[in-house]
Image (tube, rainbow, N blue to C red):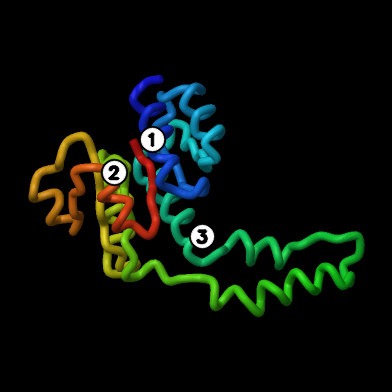
Amino acid sequence: PNFLGRKVSWLHQYISPSILSLYPPDKGEYQEQLLTMAGIIYCNSGLAAAEAVADFAVTMIISTFRHLPWCMGAATFISSSPHSPAREEVFRACHTHATAARHNPRGHTLGLIGFGNIGQHIAAKMGNPAFGMHIAYHDLERKPAAVEAQLRAVFYPDLPSLLRVSDCVVLCT
């Protein structure tokens, strides 16, 4: 397989199959199939601009930390009857446990695999004082010190070292 295929195969041994994956649309169906087979969530942004892709990544990162799919699913759970015990049970379980299960992204480390235009946009958004995440990245080439300083990003020369420090990983190559 090509470079991304090798990276996905290698990366899968270190992570749970729920990694968020964003990459440019020109990578083709082959990579989409590799990611899907590896159990990795695939989010292709089409021809959107880097900022729009980064916004989507921010949404997914917050959603992951805050368990939003669970909460939204519980709030909109559909059963055969709007007043069924199952509907109420699903909602109450989420209401009771969601606060203890969710996390604030602030102070956690966001690992970015790939630090091109999209990766840097994500870093600028998630590393700013509003979200307060620490930014770690791995790329084939280390970015200039001025870029790292501006984005408060720390370079990791290999994927295992990046994964060890990351609480959340976004693949954006």
Q: What residue type is labelled 1?
A: Trp
Residue designated by label 1: 10
- Picture quarter containing residue 172? top left
User: Does residue 35 appear to the left or right of 151 in the view shown?
Assistant: right
Instruction: State yes or no: discs 2 and 1 in contact (Cβ < 8 Å).
Output: yes
How many numbered circles are shown? 3
Residue 100 drawn above or below residue 56: below
Gap between marks 3 and 1, in whole Å?
Answer: 26 Å
Residue 96 in the image: x percent, y percent? Answer: 65, 79
Quarter of the image containing the C terminus?
top left
Viewport quadrant of the N terminus: top left
Q: Residue at x 35, y 45 (%)?
A: 51
> Mark number for residue 63?
3
Label 1 neighbour load within 10 Å: few <14, some 14-19, many 20+ = few
Considering only order in the chain, which callout, 1 or 2, is on the residue closer to the N terminus?
1
Q: What residue type is labelled 2?
A: Leu
Comes first in the chain, label 3 or label 2: 3
Q: State the CA–CA distance, disc 3 to disc 2.
A: 24 Å
Q: In which quarter of the image is residue 85?
A: bottom right
Residue at 28% from the left image edge and 61% from the top image edge: 127
Q: Position of residue 21 (x, y in %)?
A: 44, 42
Relative vertical location of residue 15 with respect to residue 49 in this rendering, above or below:
below
Q: Can residue 125 be seen in this view?
A: no
